[in-house]
Image: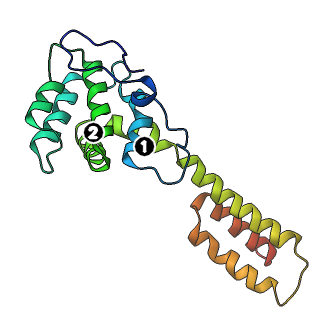
Amino acid sequence: MCMTVTAPGASRQCQTQAHCCGVDSDSSRRYQTYCDRLVQDTPFLTGHGRLSEQQVDKIILQLNRYYPQILTNKEAEKFRNPKAALRVRLCNLLSHLQQSGERDCQEFYRALYIHAQPLYSCLPSRHALRPLGFLACLSVAVGLALLIYCCPPDPKVLPGARRVLGFSPVIIERHISRYLLTFLAEDLGGP
């Protein structure tokens, strides 16, 4: 969690743990803004040893020097102040970005990707939606299989449903497609 105590020389402290380190209560929704992702990822990013001093400095410099300029020179100096603890500076930076808006949060993620790609790939917000996508596809496949299995064999309706089911592997994830193709092959007289 973020520190709630200001280190000597730090310009400000995290305002509240709920704001700086809280997880969005609606984090499981389908579309997350970059600000929502930053709120969700803040506890992970401020964890001990996640980001080195050099990585944080490179991220701050990118947000300050490259287009679009997110941080002013004064803000960059404040967040690079070596007298303040790294964790406090990082927490202050993330809090500042959350307040600044969507574009600033997006640029932070771009800088994080460039300067700390292994950490970027492990962010909680990047892994939050993967199980939901698989479960959604699985529920569609199960629903279609139950529809085919439980539906009375009506020669006019069933072939149309089989055509839709036959094209569904193209649409849904590959993990489920092999089960649907196996079901169709067995039902149509295949192996």
> Can residue 116 be seen in the rendering of this structure?
yes
Cα distance in 3D space between marks 2 and 1: 16 Å
Residue 148 higher or lower than 35, as above or below: below
Is residue 73 found left or right of 42 in the rendered image?
left
Q: Position of residue 151 (x, y in %)?
A: 87, 75
For mark 2, give the secondary structure.
helix
Report the residue at 16% width, 13% height from top.
83
Is residue 113 found left or right of 3 in the rendered image?
left
Is residue 136 found left or right of 64 in the rendered image?
right
Q: Quadrant of the C terminus?
A: bottom right
Residue 20 lies in what quarter of the image?
top left
Circle 1 sits on which residue? 36
The numbered mark at residue 112 is 2
Q: Position of residue 158 (x, y in %)?
A: 81, 83
Q: Total of numbered circles in the picture?
A: 2
Report the residue at 15% width, 50% height from top.
68
For mark 1, give the secondary structure.
helix
Residue 123 higher or lower than 101, as above or below: above
Residue 131 higher or lower than 177, as above or below: above
Give whichever of discs 2 and 1 has the lower sequence position: 1
**Structural crowding at the residue carrying mark 2, measured as other residues with C-alpha within 10 Å and reported as few (<14), some (14–19) or many (≥20):** many
Tell me the amino acid under the disc marked 1: Asp
Q: Position of residue 27 (x, y in %)?
A: 52, 43
Q: Position of residue 78 (x, y in %)?
A: 15, 25
Q: Do tag 2 and tag 1 residues touch (Cβ < 8 Å)?
A: no
Report the residue at 24% width, 22% height from top.
89
Instruction: Name the foreground residue: 1 vs 118.
Output: 1
Instruction: Choose mark 2 or mark 1, whichever is in front.
Output: 1
> Can residue 51 be seen in the rendering of this structure?
no
